[in-house]
């Protein structure tokens, strides 16, 4: 009888220990609205791997790409309320919470990718993260979508006059709307998922996206010309719910931050490596690619957009970005 009781006690104790170990495990839900094939998702999967290895499984990150947990708007809302723990989300979706992010959409605010990385990995990123902190989010790192370029079905775009009259789809960004209005186009805010059909039917003439989104959406099937205007840069923020992050141990927080930075560098490199091949693949389908764009004329034509932004929101972020423009 005593042996039986001892055995039962041991079983109960072991079960309790197992339950305690299971309870000690931290599970984080990471969401993005882009497809699993996108480099952003590949960066997210790399983050999951790094965290698992560094914590030896004590922190499990469950990854939900493809908009599984909702649209970009729903994901941002979910991370703020805590129903989603983490997100990889386009910065254009954060401007309503922290107006510093609106500066990232300004036309020709960034010279090139090294300029972007110096800014977002330095003082600009710190300033934006400080704004996020006030709305219940912690900024971990910055992925990218890349520089925006224009496709259309009318003619190659070389000077601002080539944009006039185009019905061009834009995301929900007042800055991008203002940019194309300054160029004489007719910007039409529209969801990404509706764009292919709108161009196929002729309801929309044109669109602007970074290369990965353009390629993934197969817009080259319904557009004739790609002009490398590089008029705007689409940054992507990796954020976590502040309450959830504060509950992690200092060691776990360090691991999360380090893994997010490494994942961002991995994704950026992957993006850059793939962009050239994407352009080559699209050219093979008959898309005509034009790199002969007189950027100085576009900069001058859109100067009013920056002036209006500074008047409304101030120049703090703009000055921080400009300070990194020509740093070697």
Image (cartoon, helix red, strand yellow):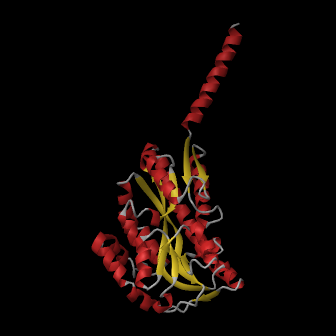
Q: How many marks?
A: 0
- The answer to which quarter of the image holds residue 266 is bottom right
Q: Residue at position x 39%, y 57% from top?
A: 132
Percent of width and height locating residue 300: 38, 89
Q: Is 189 positioned to the left or the right of 194 in the image?
A: left
- In the picture shown, does residue 63 fall above or below 104? above
**Furthest residue toward top:** 1
Mark yes or no: residue 328 visible: no
Percent of width and height locating residue 3: 70, 11
Q: Nearer the viewer, residue 79 or 10?
A: 79
Q: Residue at position x 30%, y 74% from top?
A: 310
Percent of width and height locating residue 205: 57, 81
Q: Nearer the viewer, residue 250 or 211?
A: 211
- In the picture shown, does residue 137 fall above or below 297? above
Mark yes or no: residue 137 visible: yes
Percent of width and height locating residue 225: 61, 86
Which quarter of the rendered picture does the N terminus lie within? Answer: top right
- The answer to which quarter of the image holds residue 328 is bottom left
- In the picture shown, does residue 19 fall above or below 166? above
Q: Is 43 positioned to the left or the right of 4 in the image?
A: left
Q: Nearer the viewer, residue 171 or 257?
A: 171
- The answer to which quarter of the image holds residue 22 is top right
């Amino acid at each position: 009888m005593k042996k039986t009781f001892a055995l039962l006690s041991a079983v109960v104790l072991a079960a309790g220990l197992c339950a305690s170990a299971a309870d000690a495990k931290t599970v984080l839900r990471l969401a993005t609205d882009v497809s699993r094939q996108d480099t952003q998702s590949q960066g997210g999967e790399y983050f999951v791997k790094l965290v698992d290895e560094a914590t030896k499984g004590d922190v499990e990150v469950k990854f939900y790409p493809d908009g599984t947990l909702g649209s970009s708007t729903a994901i941002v809302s979910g991370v703020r309320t805590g129903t989603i723990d983490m997100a990889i989300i386009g910065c254009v979706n954060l401007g309503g919470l922290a107006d510093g992010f609106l500066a990232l959409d300004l036309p020709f605010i960034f010279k090139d990718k090294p300029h972007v990385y110096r800014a977002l990995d330095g003082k600009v990123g710190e300033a934006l993260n400080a704004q996020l902190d006030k709305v219940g989010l912690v900024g971990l790192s910055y992925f990218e979508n890349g520089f925006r370029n224009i496709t259309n079905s009318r003619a190659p775009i070389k000077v601002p006059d080539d944009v006039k009259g185009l019905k061009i789809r834009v995301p929900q960004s007042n800055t991008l709307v203002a940019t194309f209005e300054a160029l004489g186009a007719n910007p039409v805010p529209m969801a990404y998922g509706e764009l292919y059909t709108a161009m196929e039917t002729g309801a929309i003439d044109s669109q602007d996206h970074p290369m990965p989104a353009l390629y993934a959406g197969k817009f080259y099937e319904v557009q004739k010309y790609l002009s490398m205007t590089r008029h705007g840069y689409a940054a992507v923020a990796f954020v976590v719910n502040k309450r959830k992050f504060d509950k992690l141990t200092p060691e776990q927080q360090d691991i999360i931050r380090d893994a997010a930075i490494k994942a961002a560098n991995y994704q950026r490199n992957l993006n850059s490596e793939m962009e050239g091949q994407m352009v080559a693949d699209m050219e093979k389908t008959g898309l005509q690619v034009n790199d002969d764009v007189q950027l100085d004329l576009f900069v001058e034509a859109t100067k009013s957009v920056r002036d209006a932004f500074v008047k409304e929101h101030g120049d703090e972020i703009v000055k921080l970005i400009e300070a990194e423009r020509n740093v070697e």
